[in-house]
Image: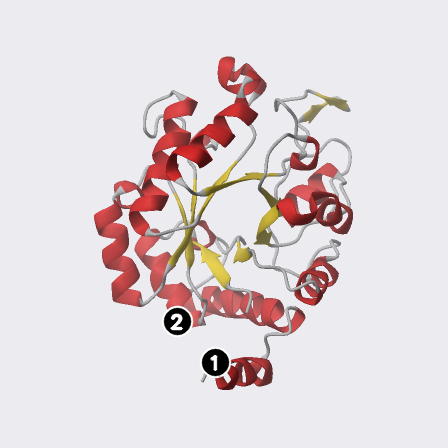
Amino acid sequence: MIKVGLSTISVFPKGVEEGFRLSAEAGYDGVEVMVTTDAKTRSPERLLELSAQYEQPIMAIHAPVVLLTTFVWGRDPFVKLDRSAELAVAVGAPAVVVHPPFRWQGKYARTFEDAVRQTERKHGVEVAVENMFPWAAGGIDRQAYLPGIDPSEMDVDHATLDFSHCALAKRDSMELALDLGDRLRHVHLTDGVAAEGGRIFDEHLLPGRGNEPVAEVLRMLAERRWTGQVVAEIKTRYARNERERLAMLTETLEFAREHLGLGEAAQDAARAADR
């Protein structure tokens, strides 16, 4: 069965413990921990306590690569990547999600593919490079990322597909999934609407509420007996209360299980087969 997890950033501005708790309440199979300025996201001991308390395995670690986390684990991006992999090993997570470097990150940007391979060999985890989107101003792509925004064009062994980022990049999600082939190991379950007029707004909508072929990609993965991870990464920050936030998380999980063929009947059959 394809596991469906929840990214802890999905409950922002709530903290990481709320991510574990709400993941358990909604019925997810585990969590992806986004490393942030919250010290608990960087403590293997605390994360393992939360994992045990809420019975939520840690499926992946998302490296601190966004601008908000510029000073987490210092400013050296090589260190950030290495410590993310080290944390993944410590908490039993098989994967690390990382964005391509910003062009201005110098040596890291120029040697990123080698750094990813070396990190995988050193720590024995999959480093899944995520697709990104162009930064445009005045209709001109500023080419903010190096070696680029598309992991299918990079010399890396593992990749993450994010539907919201595909929408911003006007990249066909199904085409990207097929281009990645066996290198696709991680999916950020979300949705988006293609950007217009150079607008940059990473929507992370609930799946089915945007224009991406999310259902079709999930069904394709299920049909091919894909062995990677699906992790919901949606925005719930505008939820008016916890009930509404939990409803958004539950709707996302039900969408995933429906299109992965993991509805209640399918899950019962799988459990019976295991016995």
Mark 2, Cα crowd under 10 Å, few <14 / some 14-19 / many 20+, is few
Q: Which residue appears at 25% of the width and 65% of the height?
A: 53
Q: Determine which quarter of the picture holds residue 264.
A: bottom right
> As drawn, is 155 to the left or to the right of 35?
right
Q: Earlier in the sequence, mark 2 or mark 1?
A: 2
* Tag 1: amino acid: Asp
Q: Which mark is residue 25?
A: 2
Q: Nearer the viewer, residue 217 or 134?
A: 217
Q: Which residue is mark 1?
A: 274
Residue 165 image offset from top left, x and y in percent:
65, 42
Work out how far the residue at label 2 is from the one at label 1, CA to CA, in angstroms.
24 Å
Render colour scheme: secondary structure
Q: Is residue 199 above or below residue 112?
A: below
Amino acid tagged 2: Glu
Q: Is 53 situated left or right of 8 in this image?
A: left
Q: Quadrant of the N terminus?
A: bottom right
- Classify 198 as above or below 269: above
Quadrant holding the C terminus: bottom left
Residue in the picture at 27% in, 58% down:
50
Residue 29, image x, y percentages: 44, 66
Number of numbered discs overlaid on the protein picture: 2
User: Quadrant of residue 200 in the image?
Assistant: top right
Could you tell me residue 156's position as x and y percent?
A: 60, 34
Label 2 vs label 1, nearer the camera: 1
Instruction: Mark 1: give few (<14), some (14-19) or many (20+) Cα within 10 Å.
Output: few
> Can residue 101 be seen here?
no
Q: Which numbered dot is residue 173?
A: none
Asked which secondary structure carries label 1, the reply is helix
Residue 242's place in the image compared with 101, above or below, is below
Instruction: Please state which of residues 254 and 109 is positioned toward the viewer in this rendering.
Output: 109
